[in-house]
Image (spheres, rainbow, N blue to C red):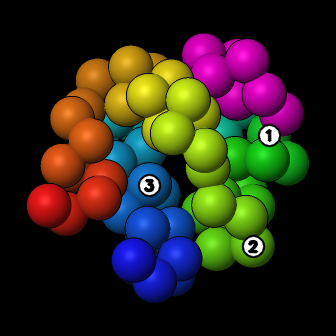
């Protein structure tokens, strides 16, 4: 999967959940900078991080991965 598509989907889910990057960082036990890097396609979250992202955003992995 292209990282930019993943980045856009993470950001879209975060905005849909009406959370800030800081709030997502706290819920995923990471930093706001890491969340920003995910959303800008600079780094790709690991599967463990993706699981935390989904829990934090109250979404399913299919919403982010698209399959």
Q: Work out whether mark 1 precedes mark 2 in sequence or the reverse, and give the earlier one.
A: 1
Q: CA distance from mark 1 to mark 3?
A: 14 Å
Label 3 environment density (alpha carbons within 10 Å; few <14, some 14–19, many ≥20):
many
Q: Is residue 33 above or below residue 37?
A: above
Residue indicated by mark 3? 10
Assign a secondary structure to mark 3. helix
Residue 46 found in image quarter: top right
Q: Is residue 19 left or right of residue 35?
A: left
Q: Confirm whether the magenta stretch covers residue 34.
A: no
Question: Which residues, given as a range, are shown in magenta?
Answer: 25-31
Picture coordinates of residue 59 (x, y %)? Answer: 24, 32
Q: CA distance from mark 2 to mark 3?
A: 13 Å
Residue 20 found in image quarter: top right
Assign a secondary structure to mark 1. helix
* Point 20% across, 50% down: residue: 63
**Residue 49 makes an appearance in the image:** yes
* Point 47% across, 57% down: residue: 11
Quadrant occupied by the N terminus? bottom left
Q: Is residue 1 left or right of residue 4?
A: left
Picture coordinates of residue 35 (x, y %)? Answer: 69, 47
Residue indicated by mark 1? 32
Residue indicated by mark 2? 42
Closer to the eye: label 1 or 2: 2
């Amino acid at each position: 999967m292209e990282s930019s598509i993943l980045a856009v989907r993470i950001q879209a889910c975060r905005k849909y959940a009406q959370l800030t990057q800081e709030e997502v960082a706290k819920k995923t036990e990471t930093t706001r900078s890491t969340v920003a890097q995910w959303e800008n396609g600079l780094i790709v979250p690991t599967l463990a991080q993706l699981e935390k992202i989904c829990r934090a955003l109250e979404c399913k992995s299919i919403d982010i991965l698209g399959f």
